[in-house]
Image (spheres, rainbow, N blue to C red):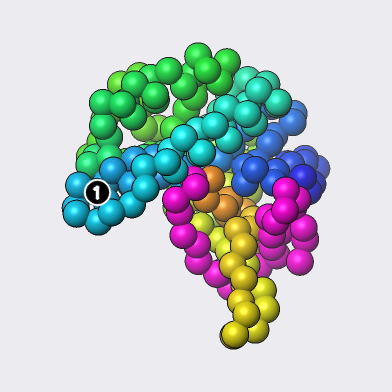
Amino acid sequence: MAAFRWGGETLELLAERAVWDPLRRVLLLADLHLGKAESFQAQGIPLPSDGDAATLNALLELAARLRPEQVIVLGDLIHGRLGLTGELRAKLAALPELLGCPLRLIGGNHERGSWIAGLAQEPSQALGPWWLSHEPEPHSSRLNLCGHLHPVTLLGGRGDRLRLPCFSYCPRSERLALPAFGALTGGMPLARHERQWLVAEGAVLAL
């Protein structure tokens, strides 16, 4: 992990593509996009259905290690209504007990129009010095922790370019974007002025 310090407090940027707030014992992650394969299959696009298992297992292993007091997803827990199968609904209902703590969801654009039993879509909100949102929402006095952007770092030249997930901090808007946690997600390079920490080989490395 790498330490990110802001306003006298420290967040831990984890190689599992999540953020740990050690003071509040809160695990933050974004963009799991569960049910993405099923959403594509419903539209006639073949996609293997094993991404959810990898994503959920990674989350459960992380929670077992850190033992958080709560897990907060910064939007796009699911990919959409078409992927909300009965099987996925059952898995989501069982998640809090398996995690050993409450699960909360800041509503994202992919949750719009969907309903998940026992998991209300919460609005953007403050958590100590942090402003939690799905899409970037600069705040006058807090650090904005968000998802939605799926930041990646590009390494190498044109003929041999590598795309790696990263955490990306924008000093102009005081925004820290989390990489997508889901196994079946793409990514987008962000502005060059942003400070980045790439995730590779089980480590978080500052660029």
**Alpha-carbon neighbours of circle 1 within 10 Å: few (<14), some, or many (≥20)?**
some
* Residue at image location 36% in from the left, 42% down from the top: 49
Image location (x, y in percent) of residue 110: 33, 46
Q: Which residue is mark 1?
A: 41
* Residue at image location 31% in from the left, 26% down from the top: 87
Quadrant including the N terminus? top right
In the drawing, does residue 98 fall left or right of residue 114? right
Q: Quadrant of residue 57?
A: top right
* Residue at image location 65% in from the left, 43% down from the top: 16
Taking 160 as reference, is 203 above or below it?
A: above
* Residue at image location 74% in from the left, 31% down from the top: 22
Provide the residue span drawn in magenta: 182-207
Q: Secondary structure at mark 1?
A: helix
In the drawing, does residue 83 fall left or right of residue 96? left
Taking 169 as reference, is 156 above or below it?
A: below
Taking 28 as reference, is 47 above or below it?
A: below
Q: Is residue 172 visible?
A: no
Taking 58 as reference, is 194 above or below it?
A: below
Which residue reaches farthest left? Answer: 43
Image location (x, y in percent) of residue 33: 40, 44
Quadrant including the C terminus? bottom right
Question: At label 1, which amino acid type do we have?
Answer: Gln
In the drawing, does residue 85 fall left or right of residue 75? left
